[in-house]
Image: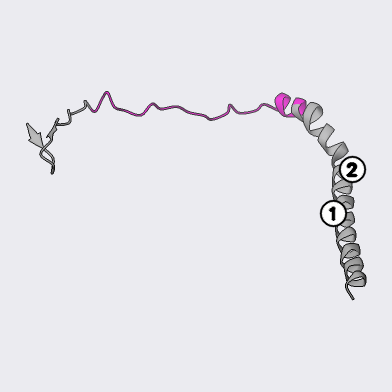
Amino acid sequence: MKTDSWKRPVEQKRKIDPEYSKQLELVFKPEDATTEHINHWQETELNWWAERQLGFVAIASLIQLSALGFMMLSFFLINIAFS
Protein backbone atom coordinates (compact mmCIF):
# COMPACT_ATOMS: atom_id res chain seq x y z
CA MET A 1 0.00 0.00 0.00
CA LYS A 2 1.21 3.48 -0.83
CA THR A 3 1.78 6.08 1.94
CA ASP A 4 1.69 9.85 1.96
CA SER A 5 4.32 12.20 3.41
CA TRP A 6 3.06 11.52 6.97
CA LYS A 7 3.28 7.77 6.45
CA ARG A 8 -0.49 7.33 6.38
CA PRO A 9 -1.84 4.67 4.09
CA VAL A 10 -3.32 6.08 0.91
CA GLU A 11 -5.62 4.15 -1.34
CA GLN A 12 -4.74 4.26 -4.99
CA LYS A 13 -7.27 5.84 -7.26
CA ARG A 14 -9.21 3.49 -9.42
CA LYS A 15 -9.14 4.01 -13.12
CA ILE A 16 -12.50 5.14 -14.43
CA ASP A 17 -13.84 3.77 -17.64
CA PRO A 18 -13.78 6.66 -20.19
CA GLU A 19 -17.17 5.64 -21.55
CA TYR A 20 -18.73 5.90 -18.10
CA SER A 21 -17.39 9.35 -17.24
CA LYS A 22 -18.65 11.24 -20.27
CA GLN A 23 -20.33 14.58 -19.83
CA LEU A 24 -23.98 14.50 -20.74
CA GLU A 25 -24.72 16.29 -23.96
CA LEU A 26 -27.56 18.63 -23.08
CA VAL A 27 -28.66 21.12 -25.67
CA PHE A 28 -30.40 24.20 -24.31
CA LYS A 29 -31.22 25.63 -27.69
CA PRO A 30 -34.68 27.02 -28.28
CA GLU A 31 -36.64 25.84 -31.25
CA ASP A 32 -36.91 28.17 -34.19
CA ALA A 33 -39.88 30.51 -34.03
CA THR A 34 -42.40 30.52 -36.80
CA THR A 35 -44.04 33.64 -38.18
CA GLU A 36 -47.20 32.84 -36.23
CA HIS A 37 -45.23 32.59 -32.99
CA ILE A 38 -43.51 35.91 -33.66
CA ASN A 39 -46.78 37.69 -34.49
CA HIS A 40 -48.50 36.23 -31.40
CA TRP A 41 -45.60 37.31 -29.19
CA GLN A 42 -45.65 40.78 -30.75
CA GLU A 43 -49.37 41.19 -30.10
CA THR A 44 -49.53 39.72 -26.60
CA GLU A 45 -46.20 40.63 -24.96
CA LEU A 46 -44.30 43.32 -26.82
CA ASN A 47 -47.10 45.76 -27.58
CA TRP A 48 -48.01 46.11 -23.90
CA TRP A 49 -44.44 47.14 -23.02
CA ALA A 50 -44.11 49.39 -26.08
CA GLU A 51 -47.27 51.32 -25.22
CA ARG A 52 -46.12 51.99 -21.64
CA GLN A 53 -42.41 52.52 -22.25
CA LEU A 54 -42.56 56.31 -22.59
CA GLY A 55 -44.41 56.59 -19.28
CA PHE A 56 -41.84 54.44 -17.48
CA VAL A 57 -38.96 56.52 -18.85
CA ALA A 58 -40.73 59.79 -18.00
CA ILE A 59 -41.39 58.72 -14.40
CA ALA A 60 -37.79 57.55 -13.95
CA SER A 61 -36.50 60.84 -15.39
CA LEU A 62 -38.70 62.86 -13.04
CA ILE A 63 -37.48 60.88 -10.05
CA GLN A 64 -33.88 61.40 -11.08
CA LEU A 65 -34.33 65.13 -11.68
CA SER A 66 -36.17 65.59 -8.38
CA ALA A 67 -33.35 63.77 -6.56
CA LEU A 68 -30.86 66.12 -8.19
CA GLY A 69 -33.03 69.11 -7.21
CA PHE A 70 -33.29 67.96 -3.57
CA MET A 71 -29.53 67.44 -3.48
CA MET A 72 -28.89 70.98 -4.73
CA LEU A 73 -31.45 72.34 -2.26
CA SER A 74 -29.75 70.56 0.63
CA PHE A 75 -26.35 71.95 -0.48
CA PHE A 76 -27.87 75.44 -0.55
CA LEU A 77 -29.49 75.08 2.87
CA ILE A 78 -26.31 73.66 4.43
CA ASN A 79 -24.37 76.58 2.92
CA ILE A 80 -26.79 79.06 4.44
CA ALA A 81 -26.83 77.31 7.84
CA PHE A 82 -23.04 77.07 8.24
CA SER A 83 -21.89 80.33 6.70
- Residue closest to the eye, 35 or 7: 7
- Residue closest to the eye, 54 or 76: 76
Q: Position of residue 75 (x, y in %)?
A: 87, 67
The residue pinned by badge 2 equals 55
Q: Position of residue 33 (x, y in %)?
A: 65, 28
Residue at 88% across, 46% down: 59
For residue 32, above or below residue 55: above
Quadrant holding the C terminus: bottom right
Quarter-of-image position of residue 50: top right
- Which contiguous range is marked in magenta? 18-40
Q: Amino acid at mark 1?
A: Gln
Furthest-left residue in this view: 1
Specify whether residue 39 is painted magenta: yes
In the displayed structure, does residue 10 sit left or right of residue 52? left
Quadrant holding the N terminus: top left
Quarter-of-image position of residue 69: bottom right
| Mark 2: secondary structure | helix
Gap between marks 2 and 1 measured at Cα: 14 Å
Q: Position of residue 17 (x, y in %)?
A: 21, 25
Query: Residue 8 got which mark?
Result: none
The residue pinned by badge 1 equals 64
Residue at 78% across, 29% down: 45
